[in-house]
Image: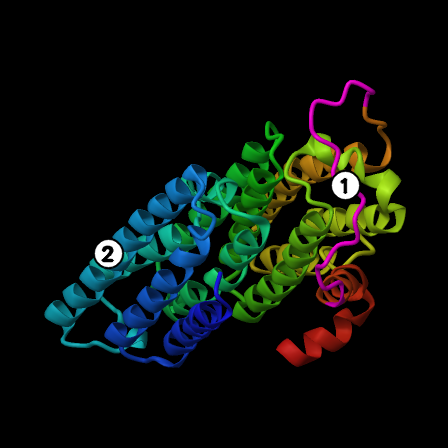
Amino acid sequence: MNPYVLTILLSSLGLGTTLTFASSHWVLAWMGLEVNTLAILPLMAQHHHPRAVEATTKYFLTQATAAAMILFASTTNAWLVGEWDINNLSHPLATTLAIAALALKIGLAPVHFWLPEVLQGLDLLTGLILSTWQKLAPFALIVQLAPAIDPMLLTMLGLASTLVGGWGGLNQTQLRKILAYSSIAHMGWMVIVLQYAPQLTLLALGTYIFMTSAAFLTLKLSSATKISTLTMAWSKSPIMVTTTALVLLSLGGLPPLTGFMPKWLILQELAKQGLPLTATIMALAALLSLYFYLRLCYAMTLTMYPNTVNSIAPWRTRSTQLTMPLAITTTIALGLLPLTPGILLMVN
């Protein structure tokens, strides 16, 4: 893609998200979401592959539906209450419609079906943008809406997402689909604690972005899209395979890695709020996710690929990808747990 066009599209992505962050009026927030969606569509379809075009079409239709629902919810609220302000979305019909639309935007269960299919059709870098940056603007709106939303609805969305994210990833062999289900599960963790401690939601979102970035950049560096391709990675770059296995375990939430911190604090908060059953279900759902991360770790570190190789072995040429972003995100994804007290002081 032409570098000037790429610069305009990436700037528009940043502009759309910033517009939504800065807005207090529903129409301005909606415009930010639309700019965001329209800016990523050319990036998704840039390879002109049938799968990429199909994924772009699915993404466009889903996001357009969600945007129309947001506009309808805000107009309904303005009609019934006379307020366009984001923080004054007070009518139950409007709040339910708005949270349903935003859940569709970020891929929360039960409206998650588009996410694995869309992510599977994209290249890894565009998939990284879709899994991290594109979640920020809708999530900012969800955080602002949280006080007005029925707590039971948020709890159900969170539980459904963690269970679907864990269960759906068990049967997958495609790495992008596994990361899509991982994204759904992590969104569930963020949503369930939103009504009790929004700062923990933002902490979980931050750690999720760094861990997912590390996972996507590693897969991009090793040109891996299937589990069978991962089994050949250890002979090419054993150090990278070691760090990748640790990043995957961090995504699964194992101590002493960074990913354990948000899960531990969220379970602690749920127990404080007198919800031991919800906390237990969340912890058990995390085990489902951990299983498919362990499956990837096992394939990368403990198996030798059979001699009858079905996939083409990649050439051992030097990669042109920048390794500094990968090094930074991997370090953050592995080593932040000892800083938990300091981070808690910052977010509280």
- Residue 213: percent from left, percent from top: 64, 58
Q: Nearer the viewer, residue 248 or 344?
A: 248
Residue at the image position 26 percent from the left and 70 percent from the top: 89
- Residue 41: percent from left, percent from top: 38, 56
- Residue 13: percent from left, percent from top: 44, 69
Q: Nearer the viewer, mark 2 or mark 1?
A: 1
Q: Is residue 176 above or below residue 213?
A: above
- Residue 11: percent from left, percent from top: 45, 74
Q: Is residue 173 left or right of residue 259?
A: left
Mark 1 is on which residue type? Trp
Q: Is residue 246 left or right of residue 251?
A: right
Element type at marker 2? helix
Q: How many marks?
A: 2
Q: Dividing the picture into quarters, in which one does residue 55 lie?
A: top left
Residue at the image position 82 percent from the left and 52 percent from the top: 243
Residue lying at the far left in this picture: please name it.
Answer: 79
Residue under label 2: 69
Residue at the image position 68 percent from the left and 55 percent from the top: 217
Q: Nearer the viewer, residue 234 or 29?
A: 234
Element type at marker 1? loop
Please rate how many residues cluster around mark 2, counting C-alpha atoms within 10 Å: few if below 14, some from 14 to 19, many from 20.
many
Residue under label 1: 315
Mark 2 is on which residue type? Met
Residue 80 tag number = none
- Look at the image and give the residue range highlighted in magenta: 306-324
Magenta region includes residue 319: yes
